[in-house]
Image (tube, rainbow, N blue to C red):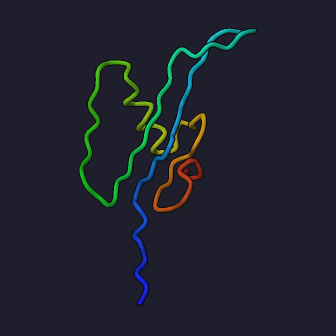
Amino acid sequence: MASTAAVPLISLQNLRKVYTRGVLVRRPTFKLEADLSIDGPGIVGVLGPNAAGKTTLVEMMTGSKAPTSAPGLLAGGDISLVK
């Protein structure tokens, strides 16, 4: 009997958000890169200093902010499609 691997509840692999400035030459001002896997329901805390990207990470996890690359997965589906 073959076993099936459980799909993580939330999976972020190479999730990236880049903010830039400049009109003619775009220069990155902030980069957030994350790898995270949450297997099931639970309480998760995100700690870090001011302007470290905690809110941006949560907004990308909930689908309210689009990542620059590598969309996250919610129960195996693209988080950016959650409305």
Report x, y in % for residue 76.
50, 62
Residue sitting farthest toward the front = 1
Image quadrant where residue 24 sits: top right
Q: Is residue 18 above or below residue 59?
A: above
Report x, y in % for residue 10.
42, 54
Q: Which residue is found at the position 56% from the left and 46% from the top?
A: 71
Q: Is residue 77 above or below residue 68?
A: below
Q: How many marks?
A: 0
Report x, y in % for residue 9.
40, 59
Left or right placement of residue 42 versus residue 78 in this view:
left
Q: Which residue is found at the position 24% from the left and 49% from the top?
A: 43
Q: Which residue is found at the position 41% from the left and 38% from the top?
A: 58
Residue sitting farthest toward the bottom = 1
Q: Is residue 26 above or below residue 31?
A: above
Left or right placement of residue 22 versus residue 75 in this view:
right
- Image quadrant holding the N terminus, namely bottom left
Left or right placement of residue 72 versus residue 3 in this view:
right
Report x, y in % for residue 59.
46, 37
Residue sitting farthest toward the right = 24
Q: Which residue is found at the position 43% from the left and 35% from the top?
A: 57
| Foreground pick, 60 / 33 | 33
